[in-house]
Amino acid sequence: MIERIYLGDRSVKGIEIDSWNLIVRIKIDFISRLKPGSQNWGFYTDEDIGDGYMVFSGVTSFQVSPPGAIPDDYIVDYSIGEVQGNDLLFKMYSGGMTPDTPDHRGGCYTLIRYQDCWLENGLKERVE
């Protein structure tokens, strides 16, 4: 499911961390899904999830760089890749509040090492 999403021109609205359950949720204004069988978004909106969440479980590492940055703007780029063992790595570059710039605006990376991922709607119900 997560391989079929499009996040271009979408914005990060928040990040929730559930430390005890090793879960990180990224709230995004709109999560678009690719049409089944397609490799491109093509402005397909039938399966959009407004105020949806990307949910990562089995999280072993969470990092935002530069330190102190708060992702809160457009998603510029993102990728999912494999790392050693059974872990995967989600990497996102977005705009955000950055502490070391004069206007406190800039870009930041969010890195999440995890074992499973899924989508949820605004009510935090899993979306298939």
Image (spheres, grey):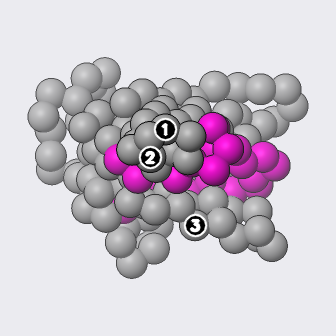
Q: Is residue 89 left or right of residue 121?
A: right
Q: Position of residue 99 (x, y in %)?
A: 55, 47
Q: Which residue is mark 3?
A: 16
Residue 3 visible within the image: no
Magenta residues span: 52-73
The image quadrant of residue 6 is: top left
**Which residue has dot 1 on it?**
101
Disc 2 from disc 1: Cα separation: 5 Å
| Residue that extends furthest to the right in the rendered view of this protein | 85
Picture coordinates of residue 123 (x, y %)? 39, 78
Secondary structure beneath disc 1? loop
Q: Nearer the viewer, mark 3 or mark 1?
A: 1
Classify 10 Å Cα crowding around label 1: few (below 14), some (14-19), many (20 and above).
few
First in sequence, mark 3 or 2: give its number: 3
Image height of 89 relative to 117, above or below: above
Do residues under tags 3 and 1 come within 8 Å of each other at their CB atoms?
no
Whether residue 126 is in magenta: the answer is no
Residue at horizontal 77 percent and vertical 26 percent from the top: 83
Residue under pointer 2: 104
Q: Secondary structure at mark 2?
A: loop
